[in-house]
Amino acid sequence: MIIQPRTRGFICITTHPEGTAKNVHNQIEYVKSKNITTEGPKKVLVIGASTGFGLSSRITAAFGYNAATIGVFFEKPAAPNKPGTAGWYNTAAFEKEALEAGLYAKSINGDAFSDEVKKQTIELIKKDLGQVDLVVYSLASPRRTHPKTGVAHSSVLKPIGEPFTNKTVDFHTANVTDITINPIESQEEIDNTVAVMGGEDWKFWIEDLKEAGVLAEGVKTVAYSYIGPELTHKIYKDGTIGMAKKDLENTVPTINNILSDLNGVSYVSVNKALVTQSSSAIPVVPLYVSLLYKVMKEKGIHEGTIEQMERLFAERLYTNDGIVPLDQEGRIRVDDLEMRDDVQKEVDDLWKIVTSENINEISDIKGYRDEFFQLFGFNYDDINYEADTNELVEVPSIK
């Protein structure tokens, strides 16, 4: 079928299999070009492996360290005349390249919050790998059905206390406007957001994997977070999402205790602001990222998800001296370039003057838009989107 980009609000509802394969291939080639020589993970489980940081983590483990990888995700396969989701095509492309490179790669498609998928994953590890030495937790979902209570929780993106008003941009039209987001109406909204995006499910995964005996001696586990600049704090760090991320950080000592007899350790990695399916839906963030990209590209320090994850693995998790550098709160920081004083000062200056009239000159809104569509396989110059393409792409390990 001929597949063109179609959007609904902040989401692209079509995906292109050739374009998503190119995105995956480009990431693989980047990691291979780094010629990583340090020791790293050998058997890796990535929970939330099909897009964003999770996908880039899987690519880094496999093509940077020749690791066997198992990926868990919840994606929609293709059907006749109906493209699959981007994550489905990403995984199909990843597995194809991994198998061609002689690497073990298998995937499980299902609700990672459920006990059923946890059991299925454990069975696969036992059967094929025995144990894993790295567990990456990179789930991004708006909803979670609690596996113990059966209660369905939905997260909300709201400030706490007062309404939040600031600039935002419709990145499709480059129209800059003010937006006001009303605060939470009850503690329940915080609790639900924490239930979806906090640390409980990460802990459940580690408990189940440990009990099943599939975690190796010295196992590491890492989950991903974001802090960002002060101008986004009211909607992010100090809002409902921030409360969930705080819960994620507070789970680290509990997981460390679970892993203590294996000499295992857990970390939260604070990553850079990037164009992802999740971040595109957060008001204020697309405008901030567009300005940030402009500044960081001009300074030659811009990073996408694959550059971030390669640096996380090679310069943080798996260093030559074995020491993982942490901040005062015990977190890994790979947002260090974003949060540099000179970078933030220039972004702040641009933020004060950005309007619909000057946004194309003083920001990288075009780069933001291109990167957004590339998440779904579009906006690649060397792909003919008028040509017929096969939408019925399968993930080799999922029958």
Image (cartoon, helix red, strand yellow):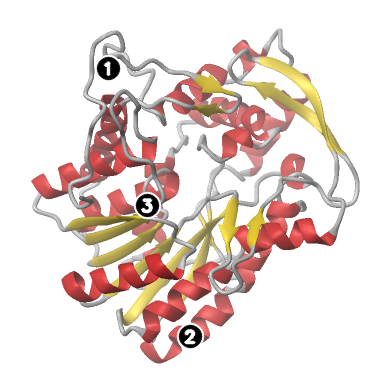
Spot occupied by residue 7 in the image (x, y as percentages of width and height): 52, 21
Callout 3: few (<14), some (14-19), or many (20+) C-alpha neighbours within 10 Å?
many
- Between 229 and 57, the one lying in front of the other is 57
Say whether residue 170 is left or right of residue 86: right
> Of the residues under marks 2 and 3, which one precedes in the sequence?
3
Location of residue 352 by image quarter: top right
Residue 176, placed above or below residue 132: above
Location of residue 4 by image quarter: top left
Q: Identify which amino acid the numbered label 2 is placed on.
A: Ile
Q: Which residue is located at x 47 percent, y 35 percent?
A: 302
Q: Which residue is located at x 35 percent, y 77 percent?
A: 219
Q: Identify which amino acid the numbered label 1 is placed on.
A: Met
- Between 116 and 316, the one lying in front of the other is 116
- Between 363 and 260, the one lying in front of the other is 260
Q: Which residue is mark 1?
A: 1
Q: Which residue is mark 3?
A: 49
- Between 4 and 228, the one lying in front of the other is 4
Residue 40 seen in the current view: no
Instruction: Give how far apart the Cα atoms at labels 2 and 3 are.
Output: 24 Å
Callout 1: few (<14), some (14-19), or many (20+) C-alpha neighbours within 10 Å?
some
Spot occupied by residue 177 in the image (x, y as percentages of width and height): 77, 20
> Of the residues under marks 2 and 1, which one precedes in the sequence?
1
